[in-house]
Structures are given as C-alpha cells and as structure tokens.
Image (cartoon, rainbow, N blue to C red):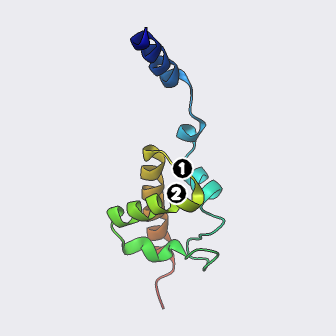
C-alpha cells in the first residue's frame, strides 16, 4: 500500500509542471536578484556584479547558493542557470567598458 502511494506521488510530481523550471536565467535574475544587483551600473543594495567577470564558476556558484538566504529557495537547475548567466553577463559588461 505504501509503495503504491509513493509510486503515485512520484508520478504525479513528475507530471506537475514547475513554473520556475520554465523561467529563463535572465527572468530569474530579474525577479530575484536585480533589486539588489546590477551589471556595470554601480552598487544598489548589493554589489555590482561586473566585478565577478574574472571569478571561476565554482566561486560564483557558491555565492548564488549563499544568496538563497535573501532571495529565496532555488532549485539546482536554477542555481546552475543563474551561475552561468551571472558569469556571462559580467564578462559582457567587462568587455564593453574596460576598467579605468
């Protein structure tokens, strides 16, 4: 009986669409991060993320994981997407406006 209930639950959970999974990393950043962070537009509540252009992905990943305390829970897929998005956007920003 328990095994049947568990199997039904697993099948149901896999069939329920997750809105966050469909969200692009850019949309996720806009919804959870942009209130406090920018790319090359200066400091808001949090630091300008232009400076992370030279960070490795592991370091950015660790910071994204830490930010869940303020931004709310993120799935592993969302964390991976945000990590890549932040790295790419920071690099674009750094290339557009080299340091003085």
Indicate the secondary structure of the residue bearing disc 1.
loop
Identity of the residue drawn at 61% across and 77% down:
41
Decide which of 54, 98 is in the foreground and name it: 54
**For mark 1, does the 10 Å Cα neighbourhood hold few (<14), some (14 to 19), or many (20 or more) residues?**
few
Residue 47 higher or lower than 22, as above or below:
below
Outermost residue to the front: 1
Identity of the residue drawn at 46% across and 62% down:
66
Residue 48 higher or lower than 66, as above or below:
below
Indicate the secondary structure of the residue bearing disc 2.
helix
Identity of the residue drawn at 48% across and 24% down:
14
**For mark 2, does the 10 Å Cα neighbourhood hold few (<14), some (14 to 19), or many (20 or more) residues?**
few
For residue 54, which quarter of the picture?
bottom left
Residue 29 higher or lower than 38, as above or below:
above
* Residue 93 % position (x, y): 50, 72
Identity of the residue drawn at 60% across and 36% down:
19
Query: What residue does disc 1 label?
Result: 73
Outermost residue to the bottom: 100
* Residue 8 % position (x, y): 48, 14
Position of the N terminus by quadrant: top left
Q: Counting residues from the N terminus, which is met first, the one under dot 1 or under dot 2? A: 2
* Residue 82 % position (x, y): 48, 55
Marker count (numbered): 2
Query: What residue does disc 2 label?
Result: 68
Q: CA distance from mark 1 to mark 2?
A: 5 Å
For residue 52, which quarter of the picture?
bottom left
Rendered image: mark on residue 21: none
User: Are the residues at dot 1 and dot 2 in contact (C-beta closer than 8 Å)?
Assistant: yes
Decide which of 48, 41 is in the foreground and name it: 48
* Residue 30 % position (x, y): 63, 57
């Amino acid at each position: 009986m328990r095994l049947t209930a568990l199997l039904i639950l697993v099948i149901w959970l896999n069939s329920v669409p997750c809105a966050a999974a469909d969200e692009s990393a850019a949309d996720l950043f806009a919804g959870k991060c942009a209130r406090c962070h920018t790319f090359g537009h200066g400091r808001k509540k949090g630091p300008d993320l232009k400076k992370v252009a030279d960070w490795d992905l592991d370091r950015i990943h660790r910071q994204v994981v830490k930010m869940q305390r303020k931004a709310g829970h993120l799935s592993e897929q969302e964390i991976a997407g945000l990590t890549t998005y932040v790295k790419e956007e920071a690099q674009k920003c750094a290339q557009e406006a080299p340091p003085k």
